[in-house]
Amino acid sequence: MSFDDPGDTRFHPDDGCPLFSERLEDHIVGVSKGQMPNRGYFCGNCYTPLGRETLHCPQCGEDTRSGRRPVDAVPQPIIDALIAQRKTESTWVTSFAYLGVLIAVISGLAIVLSIPFFRASILWATIFYAPWLLLGSRGLAGILGGYYGDRLGYEKARAKTRAAWDAWVAERGYSA
Ligand SMILES: [Zn+2]
């Protein structure tokens, strides 16, 4: 199963952590896949890729002349934070999806074993159980993984990202 593309409609909470703009996320994903070098022109505060003429970062509003100077590479701890965030998210989505499969397996068995008609006929039990398993595991995996896993995973991952951001802000200090 693959759940690694959250799409481009990602929700960005106003929680004091400016990570990660879509452009920064795209950049880091490209770098981590080896598709592009970690070189460019980035906001000195939130590391969103900027144009050379940009005066104010569109993500965090940092002034590129009077605020933190733009940098030419995204710092490794920021890259690590995104990779950790995505890993946490996909772990939650995948775990909930498997939980959905498990529920389909067990509920199907419970129904087959509790109804005398199915217990008496392995053929009818199979005819019932096969599509139940197929449709049930798909549906439940989609609902549990895609909805609950996605939301819970995002919250857990975002908490880690906020902590990583706080640690980074403390570490980099105030020199530009
Ligand atoms: Zn910025």
Image (cartoon, rainbow, N blue to C red):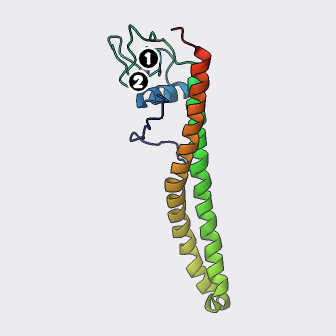
Residue 64 sits in quarter: top left
Query: In this rendering, does residue 60 appear at all?
Result: yes
Q: Position of residue 36 (x, y in %)?
A: 49, 21
Badge 2 element: loop
Q: Disc 1 vs disc 2: Cβ atoms closer than 8 Å?
A: yes
Residue 166 sits in quarter: top right
How many neighbours does mark 2 have within 10 angstroms: few (below 14), some (14-19), or many (20 or more)?
A: some
Q: Mark 1 or mark 2: which comes first in sequence?
A: 1
Residue toward you, 92 or 2: 92
Task: Residue 124: give its label.
Answer: none
Is ligand 1 closer than 8 angstroms to the Cβ of mark 1? Answer: yes
Q: Position of residue 165 (x, y in %)?
A: 56, 27
Q: Position of residue 139 (x, y in %)?
A: 50, 64
Q: Identify whether 119 is placed above or below 17.
A: below
How many neighbours does mark 1 have within 10 angstroms: few (below 14), some (14-19), or many (20 or more)?
A: many
Is ligand 1 closer than 8 angstroms to the Cβ of mark 2? Answer: yes
Name the residue rendered at 55%, 52% in the picture. 149
Q: Position of residue 31 (x, y in %)?
A: 52, 24
Which amino acid lies under the numbered mark 2 shown in the image of this protein? Cys
Badge 1 element: loop
Name the residue rendered at 60%, 39% in the picture. 87
- Could you tell me how far apart the alpha carbons at marks 1 and 2 are, in whole angstroms? 9 Å
The residue identified by callout 1 is 43
Residue toward you, 3 or 63: 63
Query: In this rendering, does residue 86 appear at all?
Result: no
Task: Residue 60: give its label.
Answer: 2
1 or 2: mark nearer the eye: 2
